[in-house]
Each structure stands twice: as structure tokens, then as C-alpha cells.
Image (cartoon, rainbow, N blue to C red):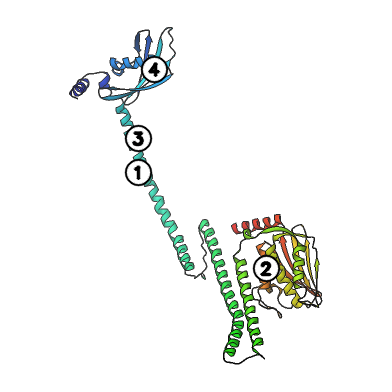
């Protein structure tokens, strides 16, 4: 260790190569020509030429080098020297010419330090330049975000009566428009839910009161009917009536929550379904004939849902038919149609209300049958409508053909985006 310190002191006191490293702030190059066992150095100040121990090592590496360019490092005076040797084409035959470029580790360390300093400077400058836009953006967004937060809090508290409309920035206008649509949908859904609960409670109240009063009479030893059997028949009938209403309500709610991709869509002949329904209702009214037409037509839909749809239409039609009820399938380029016609009196009520939940005609039962029909049709991206004829009523269900259903779905998505 003492010898190394003395060598360092000695070198620092000598002029030339080692001392010049303190002033060198870049890479240094020189040419060396090797002819046999001799070599010469050209066009280079003496203070940048490495001392003999170093340039001798450089010469040796150049002679032994098998590639065009080689990279090396060595230690001199306790400092690291990095250098490269490039093999050049010598103009003199029988000699080899090399370009040697070297750099002290002090230059490398200074270069790294300068790089870090510049990076730090750029970081500070970038942070300072970003601070002002960030402050401006914070104040710019504060007011609309506060308004949006207030409306979101009101919706979280189920208070969605106050509309939201923002005028100013185009992006916030679009955001407020979508938010307002969400509020209106929630408001409509809430009203529909409350209406549904009110109607359901009213419809279930009557059979419950009948069952309760008859049960209390039996308990008190009083038979409202001739005997116990007939009294229990009334209770059973009202219980069955209430059960059917509960089933209809659950089914309507299920359809309301169901998505298109939950349907089990398949192709099936219309006659397969129509004749099953005809057989099921054939003896419900002996004075009415059920006629099936278009049995060879093919439908592509959820057969289970279509069965419920057709059941409800036929059951509804039989209440008003006088002599005949027709179940028919038709089609055109866009739709397949399921049609149920009954001979009877025209409908005097507002036709648009017939498919509303809990709306009942003069012979209606619960008011969910036709609402379920409409739900099933719309779930298939179709439609349901009713028309008065000269001698009767026609219910028409339109089910889009496969490619048409896809077009309808795409148009709905585009409408929502706009």
C-alpha cells in the first residue's frame, strides 16, 4: 500500500501522460503503426500518448486482436483507463495500422455526474412547468366535479328528482347528458317499481281477505257455504288464484331482469308449438273452434318463452271469442309474425294500454298476461301490437329474423352513443 501511494505521488509530480488526464475531458485518439517487432506513433502530442507500460500493452492487444474493433481496460497509477483498438488498412505494405482511442475513468465519472445533474435540472424544470397547468386544471375541474358529486350523493340517497344540465365545456355537457339519462332511467324504474308493488298488493289483498274470513268462520263454527267441503273449496280456489298471481308476478319480474344473451334461441316449426297450445285449450270452451294456420313456418326464438307468449294470447282470446279463434304464423323479409285472432266485439278501450302491467279489460283476470307477452317480444327485439277488425280483434307479435335482430341491436347501441 505504501509503494502504491509513493507511485501515485511520483506520477502526480511528472509532466506528460498521467498528469494530462486531469485536463482531458474527452476521448483521445492516436495512430500506431506496427512493422514486425517495431512500432511508431504518429501525429499526436506527447502528453496524450500513454507511457511505455501502457502503450506496450495496447500494442500487444492490437497484434493479438482477431476482430475489427476491440474494447479493453487497464489500470495505471491507481486509475482505470478504457480504450478501443480499431484495425485500419495501412497504406504501407508489410505494416499494420491501428487507431487507438482511450478515456480516463475520471472523464467517465464526470460525464455520469454531469448527466445526473442535467437530469435533475430537467426534472425540476419539468415539475415547475407542470405545476401551473396542474393548478389551473384543479380549479377548472373543481366546480363541475363538485356539482357531479352532489348529484351522485343525492342519487345514493334515492333522491333523483333534481335534473342535471351543464352548459359550457363540451366534454362536461356530454357527461352531464349521460348522467341525466341515467337519472331519468332510475326515476322511471323507481316509479314503475312502486306502481308494481301497489298493484301487486292490491291484487293479492282480495284472495287473502277471502281466505282469512273463511278460515275465521270455520274456526268459529260457521260455514259460509252449505257444508265444510264447499267452504274449503272456496279457500282452495282463492289460494290457487293467489298462487297464479304470485307466479305471474315472479315471471314478469324475471323477464324484466333477463338479458338477450340469456335466451335459448333455436329454430323450430311453428306447428310444433301451436298444436300443443291448441290441444291444451281445446276443451276450455266447447263453443269456440281453435284453428291453426301456417304450421310449416319456421321461427327462431326461445321456444319456452314463445310457449308462454302464445298461451297468454290464446287464453286472453278465448275470453272474448264468440265462435272461432285463429292461431297463425306469417313472415316477410324482416320479421316472422305470430298472430292470434278472435271473432268477437272490438275493444273499446285505449289499445295502447292493453300491454301495460295490471291493466284489465272487462273480462280480465290479473292484468299481467299481455304485459308478459310484450316483455317476451321486446326481449327478442321484436314488438307486440293489437288491432280491431270488422268482427273481432287481432294480436300480432313480430320477431325479427336473425340478421334483422342483429341490426336492431346495433341501431339501439348507436342511438345510445349519440
Between the C-alphas of marks 2 and 4, the distance is 90 Å
Q: In the rendered structure, find residue 413 and report the number of the disc placed on it.
A: none
Say above or below: 402 vs 369.
above
Q: Nearer the viewer, residue 324 or 116?
A: 324
- Asked which secondary structure carries label 1, the reply is helix
Mark 4: which secondary structure? strand
| Residue at image point 78% right, 71% down | 341
Observer-nearest residue: 31 or 55? 55
Q: Earlier in the sequence, mark 3 or mark 1?
A: 3
> Residue 337's image quarter?
bottom right
The mark that comes first in sequence, 3 or 4, is 4
To which residue does mark 3 refer? 115
Please name the residue that numbered disc 4 is placed on.
99
Query: Which image quadrant: the C terminus?
Result: bottom right
Spot occupied by residue 398 in the image (x, y as percentages of width and height): 72, 63
Question: Are dots 3 and 2 in contact, CB under 8 Å?
Answer: no
Whole-number angstrom distance, CA of label 3 to CA of label 2: 73 Å
Q: CA distance from mark 3 to mark 4?
A: 28 Å
Query: Looking at the image, which residue is at 28% across and 18% down?
Result: 47
| Disc 3 element | helix
* Rendered location of residue 192, percent (x, y): 58, 72
Work out whether 44 lies above or below 241: above
Residue underneath mark 1: 124
Above-or-below relation of 292 to 363: above
User: Which of the labelled discs sits on residue 374, or is there none?
Assistant: 2
Above or below residue 68? Residue 147 is below
Amino acid at each position: 500500500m505504501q509503494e502504491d501511494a509513493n507511485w501515485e505521488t511520483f506520477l502526480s509530480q511528472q509532466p506528460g501522460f498521467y498528469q494530462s488526464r486531469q485536463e482531458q475531458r474527452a476521448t483521445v485518439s492516436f495512430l500506431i503503426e506496427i512493422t514486425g517487432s517495431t512500432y511508431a506513433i504518429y501525429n499526436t502530442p506527447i502528453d496524450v500518448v500513454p507511457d511505455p507500460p501502457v502503450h506496450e500493452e495496447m500494442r500487444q492487444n492490437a497484434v493479438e486482436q482477431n476482430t475489427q474493433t476491440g474494447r479493453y481496460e487497464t489500470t495505471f497509477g491507481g486509475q482505470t483507463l478504457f480504450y478501443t483498438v480499431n484495425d485500419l488498412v495501412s497504406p504501407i505494405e508489410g505494416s499494420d495500422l491501428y487507431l487507438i482511442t482511450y478515456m480516463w475513468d475520471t472523464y467517465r465519472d464526470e460525464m455520469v455526474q454531469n448527466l445526473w445533474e442535467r437530469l435533475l435540472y430537467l426534472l425540476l424544470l419539468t415539475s415547475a412547468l407542470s405545476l401551473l397547468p396542474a393548478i389551473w386544471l384543479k380549479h377548472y375541474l373543481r366546480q363541475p366535479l363538485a356539482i357531479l358529486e352532489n348529484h351522485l350523493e343525492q342519487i345514493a340517497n334515492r333522491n333523483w328528482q333534481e335534473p342535471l344540465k351543464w352548459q359550457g365545456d363540451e366534454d362536461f355537457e356530454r357527461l352531464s347528458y349521460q348522467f341525466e339519462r341515467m337519472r331519468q332511467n332510475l326515476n322511471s324504474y323507481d316509479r314503475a317499481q312502486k306502481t308494481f308493488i301497489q298493484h301487486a298488493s292490491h291484487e293479492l289483498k282480495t284472495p287473502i281477505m277471502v281466505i282469512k274470513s273463511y278460515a275465521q268462520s270455520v274456526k268459529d263454527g260457521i260455514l259460509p257455504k252449505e257444508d265444510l267441503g264447499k267452504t274449503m273449496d272456496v279457500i282452495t280456489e282463492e289460494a290457487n288464484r293467489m298462487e297464479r298471481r304470485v307466479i305471474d308476478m315472479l315471471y314478469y319480474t324475471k323477464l324484466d331482469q333477463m338479458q338477450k344473451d340469456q335466451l335459448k334461441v333455436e329454430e323450430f316449426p311453428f306447428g310444433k308449438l301451436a298444436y300443443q297450445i291448441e290441444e291444451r285449450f281445446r276443451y276450455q270452451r266447447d263453443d269456440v273452434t281453435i284453428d291453426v294456420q301456417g304450421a310449416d313456418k319456421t321461427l327462431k326464438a326461445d321456444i319456452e318463452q314463445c310457449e308462454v307468449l302464445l298461451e297468454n294470447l290464446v287464453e286472453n282470446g278465448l275470453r272474448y271469442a264468440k265462435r272461432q279463434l285463429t292461431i297463425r304464423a306469417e313472415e316477410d323479409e324482416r320479421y316472422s309474425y305470430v298472430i292470434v285472432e278472435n271473432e268477437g266485439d272490438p275493444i273499446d278501450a285505449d289499445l295502447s294500454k292493453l300491454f301495460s302491467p295490471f291493466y284489465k279489460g272487462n273480462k280480465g283476470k290479473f292484468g299481467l298476461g299481455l304485459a308478459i307477452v310484450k316483455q317476451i317480444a321486446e326481449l327478442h327485439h321484436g314488438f307486440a301490437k293489437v288491432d280491431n277488425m270488422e268482427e273481432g280483434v287481432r294480436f300480432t307479435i313480430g320477431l325479427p329474423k336473425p340478421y334483422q335482430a342483429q341490426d336492431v341491436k346495433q341501431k339501439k347501441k348507436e342511438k345510445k352513443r349519440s
